[in-house]
Amino acid sequence: MSEKSDARSFLTLHFSLITFHFSLFTVPMNILICTTQVPFTTGGAESHVEGLRRALVQAGHNAEVVALPFKWYPPSEIMRSALAWRLLDLSEANGKPVDLVIGMKFPAYLVAHPRKVLWIMHQYRAAYNLWNTPFDDLSNYPDGPQVREWIRQADSRLISDAKKVFANSKTVAERLRRYNNIESEPLYHPPPRAATLRSGEQGDYIFYPSRLEPQKRQELLIEAAQFLKTPIKLVLAGGSRDPKHYESLIRKYGVGDRVCLRGFVAESEMIELYAKALGVCYLPFDEDYGYVTLEGMLAAKPVVVASDGGGATEFIEQESEGLIVLPEPRAIAEALDSLYADRARARAMGERGQEKIKAMNLSWETVVQNLINGAG
């Protein structure tokens, strides 16, 4: 046998021993992901939770989701839901010890467990950043102020029980610090379509993919259509509990030739709509994270976001990866017209956004490693 063969054999054996050595310390754990679920409703939060479950399983752990239905009206139901989570015994299940609990949403993250890590998507926002806004569903009740104070005290006292607190964005981390004096670490994850999004030829439309609801503020985009000066079109894709409301707005502003409501679309069509758009528009109020922004960047499209968009604005710098505008129809229309008028500029912004998001190396492997390490 040659010296080179001996060297290769030695390195192969050495590598195998190292791999075996590290495998001894990769002990599979029984992990429960705790979240809440509004029945008959799915969206980004559910994709977030399922993405984590899959990543934990791929890392070799036994992971399952525990979800309780959540009802926020009347406000007393909120306290009942929180109490239900505190009364749960998740120390073991079916004779198997639960090694780790990961809390995600209010009030699920209030669950008691000796080894709990939180990755907070959002708190009960009506008690915090949505209080006394048009999107607040708590302050109009007679007992709303009392329940709001109860929620804040519960969060301030019980979130700190966790071994480690992560937030899914800087925006959520800043709320925890501002309202509850709780420090947390932002922990980003890739959006659900990260592996399938692609860039394509520039079309003549702006794409707004999201469930149609008040807090996403598609109304602003529909109203902006009447002020557009270029031939640009607006395509909205997403389900709605009240589609007739948005159809009536299109009639009200006389923009039926500008605005297309696609409703729920298949995944393949969603990818195609991203790929062929001139740009992406996303206008939620004080969003937690904002998958649409990330997905628009991954599809190499300039993203137009509102200045009060919270997490939706977190990755966008003005005139670099997109445009940050006032949440006002005329300002939105002007920004969209500027993309149509200078398509080379729009393309350059989209390419910068794609490069930026790829350079961040967002991965579920990093998320799992941080959560596991956070448990100590």
Image: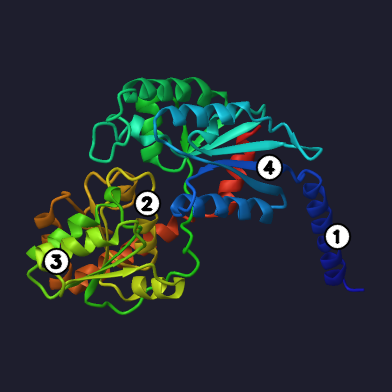
Of the numbered discs 4 and 3, the one sitting upstream in the chain is 4
Q: Which of the image's four quarters has the N terminus?
A: bottom right
At 83% across and 71% down in the image, what residue appears? 4
Amino acid type shown at disc 4:
Ile
- Foreground tag (3 vs 2): 3
Q: Is residue 375 left or right of residue 357?
A: right
At 18% across and 62% down in the image, what residue appears? 248
- Foreground tag (2 vs 1): 2
- Residue that sits furthest to the bottom in the current view: 201
Mark identifier at residue 13? 1
Amino acid type shown at disc 3:
Arg
Residue under label 2: 290
- Foreground tag (4 vs 3): 3
Q: Distance between the residues labelled 1 and 4?
A: 34 Å
Q: Is residue 2 left or right of residue 362?
A: right
Q: Residues within 10 Å of mark 4 (few under 14, many from 20)?
A: many
Under circle 4, the secondary element is: strand
Comparing 258 with 182, the one in front is: 258
